[in-house]
Image (tube, rainbow, N blue to C red):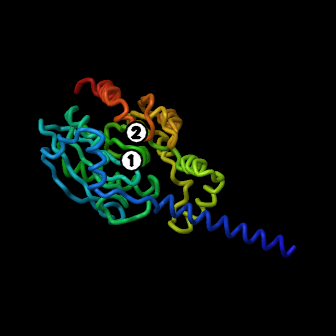
Amino acid sequence: MLTVAIIIAVLTALLAAAGFLLAGYSMAGGRRQTLEEARTWQESHYDLSWYDPLEKADYTVSSFDGYVLHAQFLKNPGGADRCMLISHGYTDNRFGALKYAYMYLEQGFNIIIYDLRGHGQNRPDFCTYSVRERKDLLAMIEDSRKRYPHTALFGIHGESLGAATSIAVLEEKPPVDFVVADCGFSDIVPVLKTGLKMMHLPGFLVYIASVCAKARFGYSFRRMRPIDSLKGNMIPILFIHGADDSFILPEHSERMKNATKGFAKLCLIPGAAHAVSILTNPVRYRETVSAFLAELFPDKY
């Protein structure tokens, strides 16, 4: 009996240790890119020559808990009464949003890009996969509305974590006219399970890690479900997802499209892996966004 008790105690300790390690890696692991690294990556994958000549304004926004977010406004050279706020993905920073910015400049939008919590120029912090991030995004939206009061059309666009955050913020009923969500997750648990599978580890560790995340950071993985924010949502959403995304599977966007009550479209980009749909097929991507906006706002397009 004593031997069995010792074995159980050792296994429990090992599982708890594995849970704490997974919680720590998931929420505070992964080296964040510097602005310089992100810009270098962007320049190596598409033309960024349009960025430097733009008139810009750097500023900061204080979030719900006093956390400071670094942001940049890109003025449309043709003048515009429209504004697009873009949220980047995990470990990236505001320069990661630039791959989408030119498309919206061509559509007559001014652009706002910012560093998500714990990224870019912001103070280091752990990630809650849309729980706190949605409140940060709400602070950005409210600041943008006050800072640029003459904006007639205001949209938000997100990639991966940024897309999940852009969906999660809808729970707050923000003053936005539409959302474009690219490869976002509906629920973080199956994403973490996919990651464990890739590492040949059992998926049940996610549930142990969730308890550990609650104990260590104050947030369990079970809270990180952007799809729950879509109950009763009427803000139009365009979901875009790489058909070959093996990290955040396309079914996440499919489930969210089915969950929202308002107008929604889904476009799967053939051959696109995670977070590269616009680079895989830029023509179809831009045509899809343009068609979505034209259908929503026929008097403006």
Q: What residue is shown at x 47% (from left), y 36% (from top)?
A: 260
Vertical order, 170 against 264 (above or below): below
Query: Residue 14, image x and y in percent?
Result: 67, 67
Left-right relation of 59 to 171? left
Mark 2 lies on residue? 182
The outermost residue toward the bottom is 2
Secondary structure category for the residue under label 1: helix
Q: Quadrant of the N terminus?
A: bottom right
Q: Is residue 76 visible?
A: yes
Query: Residue 17, image x and y in percent?
Result: 62, 68
Mark 1 lies on residue? 162
Q: For the residue carrying disc 1, how many other residues have a C-alpha within 10 Å: few (<14), some (14-19), or many (20+)?
A: many
Secondary structure category for the residue under label 2: strand
Given residues 60 and 31, the one toward you in this image is 31
The numbered mark at residue 79 is none
Instruction: Say which amino acid is labelled 2.
Output: Asp
